[in-house]
């Protein structure tokens, strides 16, 4: 439970102005969560500009996430990539590397994005334990990305990983398994026609 959960925004903002690092982060996070993206950007930037702030990496991730969102007046993919690149080799930045891989793919930098995406997913799978949902969805997404890049063998491998991590007692998982199997069949057909890029 957050130490600030029962505090008003006014109270937390006052603590933030007095130099409380966690309060500064709390204000930024509340602004983002409420859709007040301009104030969230301003607050996260102050944290990002302080390399000794204990929430520096978290702030960079969230600031990049705001800039990476499609269809937003604050969308700035170039700045999102720059921010993610600044933390890609730091500890605790697995999600940042994952998002950077996705952005590279969106920007047409497939051969840079996919290995980064794949490396992040494999670490998340290791950490996921018995909670398969996140890694299942990510495996499916990278399978689709590899299929689009005509890496049909790798795509099929990730479709199978998504299937293996599915619980078919849930309708959403049954739907994903059905789509993954369709993807595997498509890979086999296209691989026979086009070959495999690797």
Image (cartoon, rainbow, N blue to C red):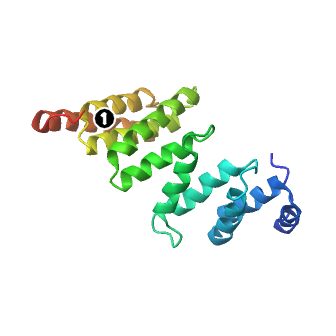
Helix, strand or loop under label 1:
helix
Is residue 23 visible from the viewing direction of this image?
yes
Of 96 and 37, which appears nearest the observer?
96
Left or right, 97 with reference to 153? right
Q: Residues within 10 Å of mark 1 (few under 14, many from 20)?
A: many
**Direction left: furthest residue:** 193
Residue visible at 63% across and 37% down in the picture = 91
| Whether residue 8 is situated above or below residue 152 in the rendered picture | below
Q: Position of residue 195 (x, y in %)?
A: 14, 34
Q: Quadrant of residue 155?
A: top left
Q: In which quadrant will I find the N terminus?
A: top right
Left or right, 29 with reference to 176? right
Q: Position of residue 151 (x, y in %)?
A: 26, 36
| Whether residue 193 is situated above or below residue 110 in the rendered picture | above
Q: Position of residue 74 (x, y in %)?
A: 53, 70
| Whether residue 160 is situated above or below residue 17 in the rendered picture | above
Residue visible at 55% across and 57% down in the picture = 65
| Whether residue 196 is situated above or below residue 79 in the rendered picture | above
Number of on-image labels: 1
Residue visible at 76% across and 62% down in the picture = 27
Q: Position of residue 149 (x, y in %)?
A: 27, 43
Is residue 34 visible from the viewing direction of this image?
no
Q: In which quadrant will I find the C terminus?
A: top left
- Residue under numbered circle 1: 155
Residue visible at 50% across and 67% down in the picture = 75
Left or right, 177 with reference to 57? left
Q: Quadrant of residue 113?
A: top left
Left or right, 158 with reference to 33? left
């Amino acid at each position: 439970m957050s130490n600030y959960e029962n505090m008003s925004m006014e109270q937390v903002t006052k603590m933030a102005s007095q130099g409380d690092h966690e309060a500064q982060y709390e204000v930024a996070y509340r602004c983002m969560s409420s859709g007040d993206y301009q104030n969230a950007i301003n607050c996260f930037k102050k944290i990002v500009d302080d390399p000794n702030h204990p929430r520096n990496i978290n702030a960079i991730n969230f600031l990049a996430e705001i800039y990476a969102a499609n269809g937003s007046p604050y969308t700035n993919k170039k700045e999102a990539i720059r921010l993610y690149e600044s933390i890609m080799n730091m500890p605790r930045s697995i999600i940042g590397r994952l998002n950077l891989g996705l952005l590279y793919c969106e920007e047409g930098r497939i051969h840079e994005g996919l290995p980064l995406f794949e490396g992040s997913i494999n670490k998340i799978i290791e950490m996921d334990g018995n909670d398969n949902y996140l890694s299942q969805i990510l495996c499916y997404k990278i399978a689709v990305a590899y299929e689009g890049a005509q890496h049909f063998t790798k795509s099929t491998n990730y479709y199978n990983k998504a299937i293996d991590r599915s619980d078919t007692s849930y309708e959403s998982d049954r739907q994903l398994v059905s789509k993954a199997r369709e993807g595997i069949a498509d890979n086999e057909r296209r691989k026979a026609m086009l070959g495999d890029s690797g």
